[in-house]
Image: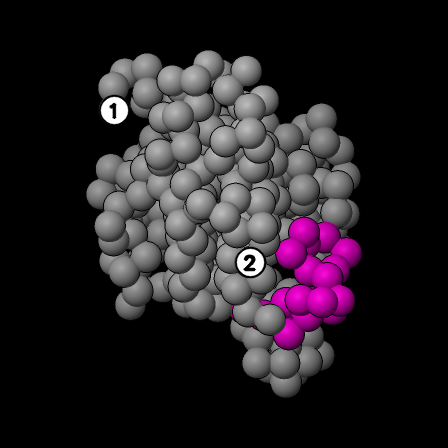
Amino acid sequence: MERFVRIEKLLGKGRAAWLRRRSVTIVGIGAVGGYALEGLARAGISHIRLVDFDMVAPSNINRQILALDSTVGMLKVEAARQRVLDINPRCRVEALPLFADATNIAEILTPPPDIVIDAIDSVPSKIELLAAAYRRDIAVVSSMGAALRTDPGQIKVNDLFNTKKCPLARRLRKQLRQAGVGPGITCVYSTEDIDFTYGEPIGAADTDEQLRQGRRPRRLLGSLPTLTGIFGLVVANTAIYKLLDRSATGG
């Protein structure tokens, strides 16, 4: 396809064709997940499963590529599906409006994709997804926290069990070890120092407002569109090259 000719020029026709035939599941289509989706769709991935229960809200507009005046009130997975098909009408897009948890992880990972993008902001859900993918031997690229960060130069890619200075990765490691999960999960994270502790209570005012909107309670954290976008594109780039590595080994 002419729209992906520059991908072929860079990778070669064989590797670009391999990439187009891959399937990707993206769980969490928010600030990071939306930009990860953008990168993967524009790379020509032909089968994308989207998982997110939430709707686009006005407060998303500052940092989420799917959030526009025209999409406010839409399910994020539906807004994402429409955007992907506008980029590549030949892409097979599955939109699952689900909150990922122990009751539906098997559904989310069946049939198994070539790679999973974890862009979830709920720690329990993140652990469920990562543990399930690990046990099924499904490749993962997991995003750690992008909120509160301001320095793109400190964004890194590493195994989750080898990260430093990331509060979310530290918490995940502890709970994943308890679930029998070890090294082998690739993550994108930041080494930037932040003043934040996972597990603090959610502010009551934020909870009440989110419940009125029918959305899951969560803490309101400051974030820049630039940093969340870079996080998402680094996630996509990492996933692309993990998929291409499999083409070299015949996986």
Disc on the earlier residue, 1 or 2: 2
Q: Are marks 1 and 2 in contact (CB under 8 Å)?
A: no
Q: Is residue 185 magenta?
A: no
Percent across and percent down for residue 76 are 56, 63
- The colour scheme used here is one colour
Q: Nearer the viewer, residue 75 or 52?
A: 75
Location of residue 39 by image quarter: top right
Percent across and percent down for residue 209 are 68, 80
Crowdedness near tag 1: few (<14), some (14–19) or many (≥20) residues, C-alpha within 10 Å: few
Q: Is residue 200 above or below residue 160?
A: below
Q: Which contiguous range is marked in magenta? A: 54-73
Which amino acid type is shown beneath numbered disc 1? Gly
Element marked by disc 2: helix
State whether the magenta stretch is mostly helix, strand or loop. Answer: loop
* Residue 34 is at least partly visible in this image: yes
54 with respect to 98 (left or right): right
Percent across and percent down for residue 146 are 64, 45
Q: Is residue 143 above or below residue 122?
A: above
Q: Which residue is mark 2?
A: 82
Toward the bottom, the furthest residue is 212
231 with respect to 246 (left or right): right
Q: Nearer the viewer, residue 68 or 120?
A: 68
Element marked by disc 1: loop
* Residue 116 is at least partly visible in this image: no
- Looking at the image, which residue is at 71% across and 26% down? 153
Q: Which residue is mark 1?
A: 251
Q: Nearer the viewer, residue 83 or 181?
A: 83
Q: Nearer the viewer, residue 221 or 33?
A: 33
Toward the front, the furthest residue is 2
Location of residue 218 by image quarter: bottom right
Q: Is residue 71 magenta?
A: yes
